[in-house]
Amino acid sequence: MADRVEIFDTTLRDGEQSPGASMNVHEKLEMARQLERLGVDIIEAGFPIASEQEFQGVRKIAETVRAPRIAALARSVPKDIERAAAALEPAERPVLHTFIATSDIHLEHKLRMSREQVLGAVAEAVGLAKRLVGRVEFSAEDATRSDLDFLVEVAKTALAAGADVINLPDTVGYTTPVEIERMFAYVIEKTPGADQAVFSSHNHNDLGLAVANALAAVRGGARQVECTVNGIGERAGNTSLEELVMAMRTRHDVYPYTTGIVSEEINNSSRLLSNITGLVIPYNKPVVGRNAFAHEAGIHQHGMIANKATYEIMTPESVGRARSELVLGKHSGRHGLARRCADMGFDLSETELTQLYGKFIELADRKKEVFEDDLRVLIASMRDESFETYRLRQLRVSGSDPAMALVKLSRGGAEFVETATGDGPVHSACMAIERITGVVGTLTEFSVRAATPGKDALGEAHVTVEFDGRPTTGTGGSTDIVEAAVQAYVNALNKFLALQSTREDAAAAAQGT
Ligand code: KIV
Ligand code: ZN
């Protein structure tokens, strides 16, 4: 059996289902381009039937991104499959991914279908998908809690109907490494024609076992793994791409498999996703967390000076982290800035570069050394400005109990100013924004941390705001932490408004208006 494992990235589909992680079409496209640089084999771009925005996101990625295959998800029903096929239409190498649950608990309580009916639905769905799109992946949802012999029947039926990939997901994060390795080995051995198909593993991290289970599935015969950058996803998340890939590299003696991942792009991918979604990377997250390569204990530092291999099992360079320590200053110039942004994977237009350069000089005046992470925060703050959205023009706060804020926002050509009082500077500024926009939001989470080392660091603010009961994340950056927080609030507000307008468009289209 070949030792190449294909990486199916579902950051933009299952990952985006993390509460608060929703991305607009532009953000999805930006992330998809970075996934292409990262070298993933397949990008699952979305679930087109779910909304107009999802449909447009898949379509835009299918039009633009060429190196990886582009996949779209559909339940095993004709309207989903037809919608997914339409979204994939511009793709050079599309994959239609259709699924239905196979565990008795799902059959009885969710689908209210018998096993025979499920087999019939598999045959019909895969058959239709195959007629519309060249390559089909079939997923047996909740496979790890399904009867093994029924799974074999399901795989047999899907293959007979034309499936190219059979995915056996651990939908609820329940299985263990020993069990999942056996499951793959069993289903592959018992399914006629299994050698003509690719078997895939898709794991959730409810028990913290997603990466271990994916590695075990590969030992059992899976040759495709579905994962997300930073492990984002429903509940506790999905298999973390960077952990899986670096485990295979670092312990190649135990996992003698290869992937097409350009590991030096891992850091760029991880940081970009965090900036877009506002989902903070835990400091101790393997591979990409701030502390993942930090050696605090004196005895470790002593060993590292003598020989890095004493305490370092992989190098920061191998995941693209060493370069991020190099600083830029005022004298780096526009060309230096442009080159660094290109190395970081940002494809900026001349206008964007001019705008960034202005912000960069302003920051370099306030703080001597500018790091890559500072640039990421500046670029994230510019992302908003390219849309018809609110922009923070001025913020003045005074006092603390109560605090008073004056906020000036612009939208299109118009400017709006309001003042309000509140329990603190951030609260009063949010109240002023509410007066301007008429949109009521509840700030449910708020954190500020230094983007880079040093007392003069740029503060990176992350907020979660509930608008209309929907958690929406936002990010902002400034050397003034109140300003960073208010920018993050405006960023969340803009995301909510963009989502709302695509929903309204979809409703209008549905009514034929
Ligand atoms: O977790 C799951 O079962 C899924 C499928 C749709 C593949 O995400
Ligand atoms: Zn999933």
Image (cartoon, grey):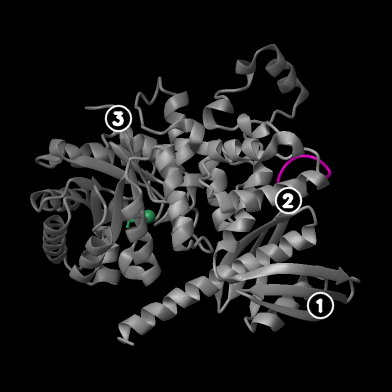
- Residue 315 place in picture, x, y as percent: 57, 24
Disc 3 marks which amino acid?
A: Arg
In space, the residues marked 2 and 1 are separated at their CA atoms by 23 Å
Marking on residue 422:
1
Marking on residue 162:
none
Marking on residue 4:
3
**Among numbered discs 2 and 1, the one appearing first in the sequence:** 1
- In the picture shown, does residue 386 fall above or below 290? below
Q: Is residue 453 magenta?
A: yes
Disc 2 marks which amino acid?
A: Arg
In space, the residues marked 3 and 2 are separated at their CA atoms by 40 Å
Q: Quadrant of ligand 1?
A: bottom left
Helix, strand or loop under label 1: strand
Residue at 70% from the left image edge and 51% from the top image edge: 358
Q: Residue 220: in sight, yes or no?
A: yes
Residue at 13% from the left image edge and 38% from the top image edge: 196
Q: Is residue 464 magenta?
A: no
- Residue 330 place in picture, x, y as percent: 76, 39
Q: Which residue is mark 2?
A: 449
